[in-house]
Image: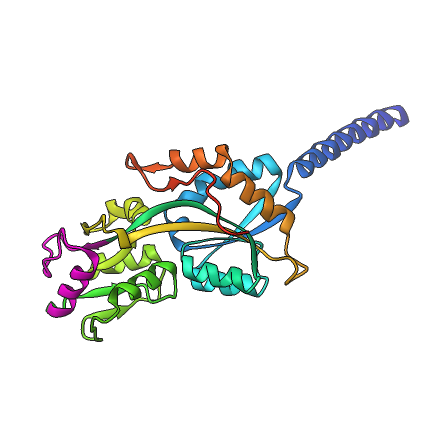
């Protein structure tokens, strides 16, 4: 009996040892670092980050936590040290962020464009117009317009187009939502809205909306990446942020961006290393 018990004990010990080695191997494969990425709802809703980030995480063993908000809120969170790196699209606000020394290592990453979408019957008659003239017609005819109303880069662009054009609560609605939700509301209510092309293309099969205005030079939509300044907050993981910026600006990262498509359409165009001010 003692011999049999001894054999049983050895078997159990061997199994237990194998389990320890297996568990240790699994743990060792997990990312050792965490990077907090503050980004816009447009990069998230388009599916770009789900496509890009696994390659970065695998290569550098860094787990990326994505916080998707409007650009204005992302920049505020960066100021407060609530993230390590930003991927946003409001150049004037980004410049202010850099001037106030909240960010370093800023780069242009990619661009797409804004579009004005609306119901297929186009009640305001804006199809083919320039952006400013389209907004004037929407105002004059008081046709429903859904604004993101969330201090995002898209919202800021929209407000810049509305400048000097009257609007009122009867037909102008602030959703206070991200791009995907705003498009869904516009579709349900048969209204117009300003959208980034990437999110619209990603969701268009679910929307009863058409692109009515595009190609106006004021609708260009560049995205910038910025590392949060570690001198402002000691908890910032600048090392991981710098790796992310170098990677997304590398040939590997830029090629991935170029190859990201939905419904056969390229959603973002890479800028292949054009830098802004450090």
* Residue at x-position 62% and y-position 39%: 61
Magenta-drawn segment: 116-140
Which of the two residues, 15 or 171, is positioned nearer the viewer here?
171
Q: In the rendered picture of this protein, how many numbered marks are placed on residues?
A: 0
Which of the two residues, 157 or 203, is positioned nearer the viewer here?
157
- Left or right: residue 244 versus residue 204 is right
Q: Quadrant of residue 255?
A: top left
- Left or right: residue 120 versus residue 243 is left
Location of residue 213 with respect to 11 vertically, above or below? below
The reply to whether residue 129 is visible in this rendering is yes
The reply to whether residue 70 is visible in this rendering is no
- Left or right: residue 54 versus residue 130 is right
- Left or right: residue 207 versus residue 237 is left
The residue positioned farthest toward the front in the image shown: 277
Location of residue 74 with respect to 166 vertically, above or below? above
The residue positioned farthest toward the right in the image shown: 2
- The image shows residue 129 at horizontal and vertical percentages of 14, 54
Location of residue 89 with respect to 175 vertically, above or below? above
Please identify the quadrant where the N terminus is shown. top right
Would you say residue 118 sits in the magenta stretch?
A: yes
Which of the two residues, 117 or 98, is positioned nearer the viewer here?
98
- The image shows residue 237 at horizontal and vertical percentages of 64, 52
* Residue at x-position 11% and y-position 56%: 122
Q: Quadrant of residue 13?
A: top right
Scheme of colours in the image: rainbow
Which of the two residues, 140 or 28, is positioned nearer the viewer here?
140
Would you say residue 81 sits in the magenta stretch?
A: no
- The image shows residue 27 at horizontal and vertical percentages of 68, 39
- The image shows residue 172 at horizontal and vertical percentages of 22, 70
* Residue at x-position 56% and y-position 44%: 244
């Amino acid at each position: 009996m003692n011999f049999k018990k001894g054999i049983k004990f050895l078997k159990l010990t061997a199994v237990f040892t194998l389990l320890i080695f297996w568990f240790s191997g699994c743990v060792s494969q997990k990312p050792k670092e965490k990077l907090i990425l503050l980004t816009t709802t447009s990069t998230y809703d388009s599916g770009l980050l789900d496509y890009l980030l696994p390659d970065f995480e695998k290569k550098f063993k860094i787990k990326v936590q994505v916080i998707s908000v409007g650009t204005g809120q992302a920049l505020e969170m960066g100021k407060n040290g609530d993230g390590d790196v930003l991927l946003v699209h409001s150049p004037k606000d980004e410049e202010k962020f850099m001037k106030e020394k909240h960010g370093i290592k800023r780069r242009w990453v990619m661009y797409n464009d804004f579009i004005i979408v609306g119901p297929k019957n186009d009640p305001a008659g804006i199809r083919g117009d320039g952006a400013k003239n389209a907004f004037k017609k929407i105002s004059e005819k008081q046709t429903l317009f859904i604004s993101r109303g969330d201090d995002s880069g898209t919202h800021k662009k929209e407000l810049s187009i509305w400048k000097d054009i009257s609007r009122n609560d009867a037909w102008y609605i602030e959703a206070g939502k991200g791009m995907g939700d705003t498009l869904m509301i516009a579709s349900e209510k048969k209204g117009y809205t300003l959208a980034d092309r990437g999110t619209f293309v990603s969701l268009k099969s679910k929307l009863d909306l058409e692109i009515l205005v595009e190609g106006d030079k004021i609708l260009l939509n560049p995205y910038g990446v910025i590392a949060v300044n570690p001198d402002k907050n000691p908890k910032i993981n600048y090392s991981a942020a710098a790796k992310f910026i170098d990677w997304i600006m590398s040939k590997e990262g830029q090629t991935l961006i170029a190859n990201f498509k939905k419904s056969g359409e390229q959603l973002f165009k890479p800028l292949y290393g054009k830098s802004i001010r450090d």
